Image (spheres, helix red, strand yellow):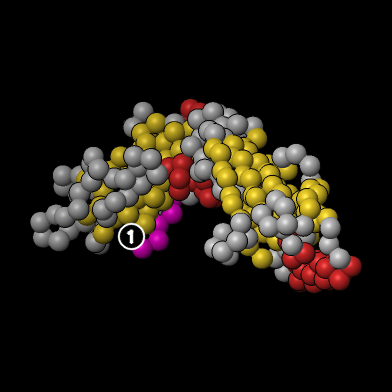
Amino acid sequence: MCAATLLLLAALPALTGQGGWCAEGEVVALEGGGPAFAPQQRTAVLAPAGHAATLDCRVLRLRDKSVSWVRSRDLQILSHAGIVFTADARVSAAAAGARHSLRIERLRTSDAGRYECQVNTEPKMSLFFNLTVVDEPVPEVVVSVLGAGSVRAPAGGAATLACQARYEPPPQQLPLPDLDIRWQKGNLPISLQGGRGVALDTARWAARVESRLTLAALRAADAGQYSCSAAGRAASLTLHVDGLGDDDRAEAMQRDQEAARGGGAGGGGAFGGARCGALLVILLLLR
């Protein structure tokens, strides 16, 4: 469960951040040091239908004034001073310090539109938020091996390991973050700074990325288990180096066994985070 939540949680800042900084309607100072809207607020919020969205309005120096949330479409007052004035049970309001929030659960496409954070000064102060509701399923990240999951190459030669990560189903409107593939051997990340022939080739598309790891001048230490991971999902590959002596093979097997024991103590590594991937996407979108 954690991975899907992480992906949505991870996706929301990116999803809501395009053109979302407060500009129109923002007031940063009033004569006499009265209430003011905090600068640089996210006023564009995007979320998928069926999930929740929160509009956060930060008001400085509110003192004895109150904040209301108004739906611009029909001028319906949804809340005032933290008290909800709608029969819609999906709507809730909260206040904590300077932050005044309006939250809508189980979003419908009809919830999309403009919402007004209003302070009852004279004249009134207003900051407008735009909510976009996308009627499409939230994608999950799928990581898979390209080609064979077991690769053989001669000692002194070269081998290429390949993986891809993609959103499934491909997003239509959701602006999800780019996927990045990370490589590990056992529990250790692959270093491109080792001074030997290690190369990484990456190709990107709208909702997919492919990564190819090439190892040159193969030796006994290169044989073993490799993993490629993205957004909490992972796939594994095995590299066999032919032409090794008995001592080299025994050394490689011992390293793999030690790496496996270390991975068990670590709580499953990237595979343990797989369930977390879908949650990350949703949490990003809903923040």
Look at 73% across and 57% down and name the residue there: 156
Q: Give the residue pinned by disc 1.
A: 98
Look at 72% across and 52% down and name the residue there: 157
Look at 79% across and 42% down and name the residue there: 148
In which quadrant of the rendered view does residue 189 lie?
bottom right
In which quadrant of the rendered view does residue 69 lie?
top left
Q: Nearer the viewer, residue 3 or 216?
A: 216
Left or right position of 203 against 64: right
Left or right position of 267 against 92: right
Q: Is residue 10 above or below residue 222?
A: above
Q: Say what secondary structure mark 1 lies in.
A: loop
* Mark 1: few/some/many CA within 10 Å (<14, 14-19, 20+): some
Say whether residue 177 is magenta.
no
Q: Residue furthest right?
A: 246
Look at 23% across and 46% down and name the residue there: 26
Left or right position of 135 against 250: left
Q: Main secondary structure of the magenta part?
A: strand
Image spot of residue 49 (x, y percent): 55, 34
On the question of residue 103 being in view, the answer is no
Q: Nearer the viewer, residue 223 or 275?
A: 223
Image spot of residue 150 (x, y percent): 81, 48
Say whether residue 96 is magenta.
yes
Given the image, on which type of amino acid does mark 1 rest?
Ala
Image spot of residue 142 (x, y percent): 68, 41
Residues drawn in magenta = 93-98
On the question of residue 243 being in view, the answer is yes
Q: Is residue 157 above or below residue 254?
A: above
Image spot of residue 84 (x, y percent): 44, 46
Counting the numbered discs, the total is 1
Left or right position of 133 against 161: left
